Amino acid sequence: MCDIYANFAISALQNGNIVLILYAQKSIMEAFFTTHKYLVEHVQSPVRRVLMDEIDWTHRLIGIKGSRGVGKTTFLLQYAKDHFGTDRSCLYVNFNSFYFTEHTLVEFAGEFCAAGGKTLLLDQIFKYENWSKELRETYDLYPELHIVFSGSSVMRLIEGNTDIQDIVASYNLRGFSFREFLNLQAGTDLRFYSLDEIIQNHTQIATEICTKVHPLEYFQDYLHHGFYPFFLEDRNFSENLLKTMNMMLEVDILLIKQIELKYLSKIRKLLYLIMNAAPGAPNVSQMSKEIETSRATIMNYIKYLKDARLLNMLYLEGDEYPKKPNQVYVQNTNLMHAVNPGNVDKSAEHKTFFYNALHARHKVNMCKYQMDFSIDQKYHFKCENRPDSGKHYSKAYYAADDIEVGNKNEIPLWLFGFLY
């Protein structure tokens, strides 16, 4: 077991010899507990995230992935506050700490367990070298220890990770839904609904919601800045989001995927080109000329941008990566406004919102039948008002952007923000 006590040495000359006088300070473990206590006591999570109730917390190794800015750190601290308070059986540790440049996770976990610890919450674990191997070793060495760790959305926890794929339960934390944003801004406590509930009872559901609040009064604000919880911070949201996007490129893609820094400008340019044309079919040949790289590299970059939650890829049913996507979407509408302020196409914005809201829990594909989306190979949707005339069939539904309450197969677009 390693000695994790921080000591300061003072040199003194006495009878020709150097005498080292060591002053033992409180242990690093105590410093971590002090930080944990402060963070838990001061954490503010104004919205209870749906994922909190969906995770099986009895699992011994839980991985929580999510893009930058969606609130993973707050989520871990809120879990600690709700279930442990400042009880020392639980400890939050951020791998920004320089302590782990010379000490191992396995050693630290051993010290924690020896002190009576039961639950470790490990944040930013991707910054620690050999993180998955040491998670496995820790898991095997300390069978009474529960570990919950957060990581980048580009990390592989199951597919291709032979260290932990058989023992980890992986979950995704998303940005705020429109429902969560609305509850926060309007002071309501509205519940979420399944897609089947919305399709079957949308008129009744929307009518009940509208007796408490008028969703359309808040909807455009959500599309502009409501997806990322840091809109609550006292900083310019768009500038903060642009900074976050660049961190996604520089850390979540370059660092984790081990891509040389000299290629950053190419990836940034590719993202900008795609975002200006989205949603649309990617012209890989044209982009490869503009970026001056191969078609295969363009496809790899698009996949990395998708994994970083900057883009979404839309395929026909039965198709998937590495095949070229039929269309590429911006991951959420806030990104659209940050990159092209004041110049966001409304139709593209509404389709992007719909795709983002649906793909959290459903399989979203491109539809073959002159509609925009096929959902779970069961429902077909078009993001526009229902036409007054024309052929209709049982699977066709319209997500209308300018109505509070729908009728028959015309459903308010905002209501799809209540899926989580």
Image: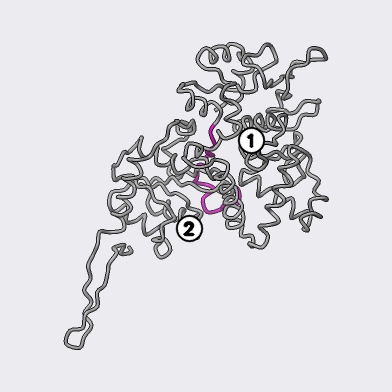
Give the position of the C terminus as an image quadrant.
top right
The stretch in magenta equals 159-176
Q: Residue farthest to the left?
A: 15
Q: Which mark is residue 333?
A: 1
- Using the rendered view, name the quadrant where residue 261 is placed: bottom right
* Residue depth check, mark 2 versus mark 1: number of the one nearer the observer: 1
Relative horizontal placement of residue 53, taking residue 312 as reference (left or right): left
Decide: is 10 above or below 280. Answer: below
Q: Residue at x 58, y 11 (%)?
A: 204
- Measure the C-alpha gap from mark 2 to mark 1: 32 Å
Which amino acid type is marked by label 2? Tyr
Q: Residue at x 65, y 17 (%)?
A: 403
Image coordinates for residue 16, horizontal then vertical, percent: 20, 88
Image coordinates for residue 309, horizontal then vertical, percent: 61, 43
Give the position of the N terminus as an image quadrant.
bottom left
Relative horizontal placement of residue 146, taking residue 282 as reference (left or right): left
Q: Residue 220 carries which label?
A: none
Relative horizontal placement of residue 390, taking residue 64 as reference (left or right): right
Q: Circle 2 — which element?
A: loop
Decide: is 419 above or below 58. Answer: above
Decide: is 178 above or below 142. Answer: above
Image coordinates for residue 13, horizontal then vertical, percent: 21, 83
In terms of depth relative to the viewer, which is nearer, 85 or 329? 329
Q: Provide the major secondary structure of the magenta segment.
A: loop
Q: Residue 128 carries which label?
A: 2
In terms of depth relative to the viewer, which is nearer, 13 or 72? 13
